[in-house]
Image (tube, rainbow, N blue to C red):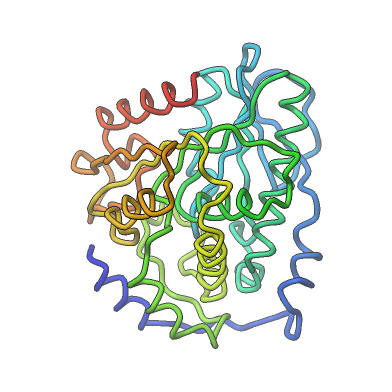
Amino acid sequence: MSKAFFCLAIAAVVAVPTSHAGEDGATWAARTSAALPEIQTRGMGKAPASSPGVQWFLSDQPARAVVVLIHGLNSKPSGMDTLASYLSSRRADVLRLSLTGHDADMKTFQHVSRQVWLADVSAAMRLAQARAQKEGVPVYMVAYSLGALVGLDWLDSGMDAQVPCQKMVLFAPPISVSLVKRSVQLLRWFPRLVIPSLNSPEYRAHAGTPVAAYSALFDSLAHVTQGQFVHANIPTLVLIDPDDELVDAAGIEDLIDRYHLDQWTLFHVTTQDSRLPGRKFHHLIIDDRALGSEEWGRVEVLMSDHLGL
């Protein structure tokens, strides 16, 4: 799948009825992104009340770190469960965040903003920090695509300076996406319109992605770029397929050089042995089905070595 094909898909826009008319992003954020309650799926500790906001994957052994795990744009949060299970098996307590709009409610997705997603990440990082302090361990971030970008935006914003993030693993971070950005910006005046998704139905949260969500993504990208990654130069592993349809891998290398991100390490991965049916999607690199067992095994080793797990 080429970037040109992606841009053609953007032109095939379908409208979805709007609701909550007249609310701005700040009002919507206040109404939908309160501090996120916790739920637990396995492992040790007391199980808090159920909520769609976050889900804990707790290690069966004393934790060596707390990891905040963040999914991609219009991706099912559960698509990160392979990562969550692996990291918890390596003695990490994993908090898997669900960004606003990534449940069954398209109307909510049509009203997201940068502020809403920053509030989501802030709440999740504060929950992770509370557990890390209790266990006496560091906090790490592992994030894919949109999750990586909003995580970087949160880090550079300094909004939770008292919550240290010591290391990151970023899968296909969309910090260099100029062609797609220009295409979507043409539609910014139609935030409730929905662009059909080209992602695998097994991984996507909705059949399409509203322009509002893309606008929120590019708002985060603008803030991160304007901030020149000033707080982001911490030990970071970046993983990307050079044939990624949405993210310019060479552009990321240029950014690393331009902003002197000397604690970042970039590794190329390949989807050539992907076990997913149909056309290969090179942006999807988050589990063994997407990459193939051998390549995913290499990613697991890279992550473990980088995070010290």
Residue drawn at (66%, 20%) of the image: 43
In-image side of 108 versus 269 (left or right): right
Above or below for 209 versus 249: below
Residue 63 x %, y %: 63, 17
The answer to which image quadrant residue 124 occupies is top right
Give the mark count. Answer: 0
Camera-side residue: 277 or 156? 156
- The quarter of the image holding the N terminus is bottom left
Q: Residue furthest top?
A: 61
Residue 32 x %, y %: 76, 62
Residue drawn at (42%, 57%) of the image: 174
In-image side of 105 versus 162 (left or right): left
Residue 195 x %, y %: 44, 75
Above or below for 244 versus 57: below
In-image side of 163 versus 87 (left or right): right
Camera-side residue: 163 or 95? 163
Residue 179 x %, y %: 33, 72
Q: Residue furthest bottom?
A: 189
In-image side of 298 versus 91 (left or right): left
Camera-side residue: 3 or 86? 3
Residue drawn at (58%, 47%) of the image: 231
Above or below for 40 versus 282: above
Residue drawn at (24%, 73%) of the image: 4
